[in-house]
């Protein structure tokens, strides 16, 4: 990417103090990546011991060009990050491309069309240090005073309200989520709502909308760049804001064709499995595809090709890149959104690289799997899968749920249902033995009477009282 953008590259080898470091081999691999690196000086450093760090810092100053700009032009600044202060409001971190940013100036966010007064500007050293102005080429911050975090988005262009720039910086667009998941609070919905709003302030790739689940109560439906992004958000909610949450299994967005009465066909975009149409209305389903490029050592090629085939991949191309082999596959996004990358690294012992590009949508034979606990459908456990994997995944899932669903004083059935048919079922054992089958010498009629009372009194009351811990949703991920 740096080569395509015409950026200078400083090649650096880190961890040269490690006993297993193969410096000469790594240098050969680096030089083989690009002709421009063939004669370049490669810096050897150890971030652990500090070896070579002064030379690298000096090279960054002398060999990488300084940012340029026109100080006398109208103000044009890029908002590249932001933070929220309960007293100061949103503090935007900006890079000045043209012009000057002066404290007390009336400014405007061009994309959001939001005006405000620059209450303070300054630089980081490393804490905020106020200054009178920022000029072209400098990086600093501006205190906006805006109290709504949603009005300041990363990537927006900042200019003055009067005599400002007419054209915003190119390339700004809202990020498109790749996977979706439900986020529900354990006990404090307002705290979760406030924490997510603050997280979305400096993470524009996080897309949120309110959601209400029959099993989990009120929460949010979040759109994320990937499974790793989802894990980061969950960790930040718990560690930075002290909010305990339950995250449902992630899914992707599908394009579906639905038939209505009168031969009317409707095209929908479905990013929530609970909104997936019923099978008698469904005409076709298309799932998002990616073109994946895997670069791996030659000795693990066969294993990685088998891995791609197991994930419903379609082989496209193969070639050489130095000592490595380049594999190109078309893969369903839903298949690789969970643990594909982890398995790739495990098989290649960390040496394989993996990159993807969107490749449109492709029709597939997908079905909706609904999970029922105690005969009540748990909407938060609904997921979409390929028909060929239904039997294997549902059998594994119900047995995993048998070990994770909290037990009651009576056995609870857990079953998976596809297109109106139960395809897998198991009973969650009770906390104690059933009184009706305790081994005592009772008549058949007394046993049946006890069973009826248990079913009528306890099951009906528990249908609307299903408590699901995070382990239940982790079980769903384990069978993906």
Image (cartoon, grey):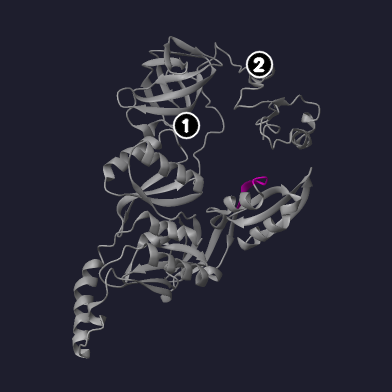
Q: Secondary structure at mark 2?
A: helix
Residue 86: % across, % down = 30, 27
User: In the rendered image, which quarter contains the N terminus?
Assistant: top right
Q: Secondary structure at mark 1?
A: loop
Relative to residue 353, is residue 247 drawn left or right? left
Labels 2 and 1: the sequence-earlier one: 2
- The residue shown at (38%, 32%) is 151
- Label 1 near label 2: C-beta < 8 Å? no
- The residue shown at (47%, 31%) is 154
Query: Alpha-carbon distance for marks 2 and 1?
Result: 31 Å
Say whether residue 355 is magenta: yes
Seen as rendered, the residue at the extreme top is 132
Please tell me whether residue 53 is drawn above or below residue 234 in the rendered image: above
Give residue 154's mark: 1
Please tell me whether residue 178 is drawn above or below residue 237 in the rendered image: below
Relative to residue 400, is residue 192 drawn left or right? left
- The residue shown at (69%, 18%) is 63
78 or 227: nearer the viewer: 227
238 or 113: nearer the viewer: 238
Please tell me whether residue 290 is drawn above or below residue 389 in the rendered image: above
- The residue shown at (33%, 39%) is 242
Residue 50: % across, % down = 61, 22
Q: Which residue is mark 2?
A: 58
Say whether residue 217 is magenta: no
- Density class for disc 2 (Cα within 10 Å; few <14, some 14-19, many ≥20) is few
How many numbered tags mark residues here? 2
Residue 8 sits in quarter: top right
Q: Main secondary structure of the magenta part?
A: strand
Please tell me whether residue 307 is drawn above or below residue 419 in the rendered image: above
Q: Nearer the viewer, mark 2 or mark 1?
A: 2
Magenta-tinted stretch? 350-359
């Amino acid at each position: 990417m740096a080569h395509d953008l015409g950026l200078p590259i400083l090649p650096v080898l880190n961890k040269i103090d490690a006993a297993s470091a193969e410096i000469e081999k790594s240098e050969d691999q680096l030089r083989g990546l690009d002709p421009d690196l063939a004669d370049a000086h490669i810096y050897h450093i150890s971030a652990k011991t500090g070896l070579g760090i002064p030379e690298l810092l000096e090279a960054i100053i002398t060999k990488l060009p300084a940012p340029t700009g026109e100080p006398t032009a109208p103000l044009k600044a890029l908002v590249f990050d932001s933070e929220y202060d309960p007293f100061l409001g949103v503090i935007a971190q900006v890079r000045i491309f043209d012009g000057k940013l002066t404290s007390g100036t009336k400014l405007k966010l061009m994309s959001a069309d939001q005006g405000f007064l620059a209450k303070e500007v300054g630089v980081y050293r490393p804490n905020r240090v106020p200054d009178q102005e920022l000029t072209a080429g400098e990086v600093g911050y501006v205190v906006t005073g805006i109290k709504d975090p949603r009005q300041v988005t990363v990537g927006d262009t900042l200019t003055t309200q009067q005599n400002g720039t007419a054209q915003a910086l190119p390339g700004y667009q809202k990020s498109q989520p790749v996977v979706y998941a439900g986020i529900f609070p354990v006990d404090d919905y307002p705290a979760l709502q406030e924490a997510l709003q603050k997280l979305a302030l400096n993470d524009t790739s996080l897309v949120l909308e309110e959601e209400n689940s029959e099993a989990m109560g009120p929460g949010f439906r979040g759109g994320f760049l990937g499974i790793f992004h989802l894990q980061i958000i969950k960790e930040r909610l718990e560690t930075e804001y002290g909010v305990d949450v339950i995250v449902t299994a992630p899914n992707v967005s599908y394009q579906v064709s639905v038939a209505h009465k009168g031969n009317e066909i409707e095209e929908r975009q479905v990013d929530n499995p609970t909104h997936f149409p019923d099978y008698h209305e469904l005409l076709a389903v298309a799932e998002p595809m990616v073109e994946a490029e895997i670069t791996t050592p030659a000795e693990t090629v066969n294993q990685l090709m088998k891995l791609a085939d197991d994930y419903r991949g379609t082989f496209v191309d193969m070639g050489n890149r130095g000592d490595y082999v380049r594999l190109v596959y078309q893969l369903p996004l839903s298949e690789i959104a969970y643990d594909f990358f982890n398995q790739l690294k495990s098989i290649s012992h960390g040496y394989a690289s993996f990159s993807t590009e969107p490749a449109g949508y492709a029709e597939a034979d997908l079905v909706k799997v609904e999970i029922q606990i105690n005969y009540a459908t748990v909407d938060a456990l609904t997921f979409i899968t390929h028909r060929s994997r239904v039997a294997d995944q549902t059998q594994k899932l119900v047995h995993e749920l048998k070990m994770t669903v909290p037990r009651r004083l009576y056995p609870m059935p857990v079953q998976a249902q596809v297109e109106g048919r139960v395809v897998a079922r198991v009973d969650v054992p009770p906390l104690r033995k059933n009184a009706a089958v305790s081994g005592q010498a009772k008549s058949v009629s007394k046993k049946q009477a006890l069973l009826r009372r248990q079913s009528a009194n306890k099951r009906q009351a528990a249908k609307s009282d299903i408590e699901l811990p995070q382990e239940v949703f982790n079980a769903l991920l384990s069978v993906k």
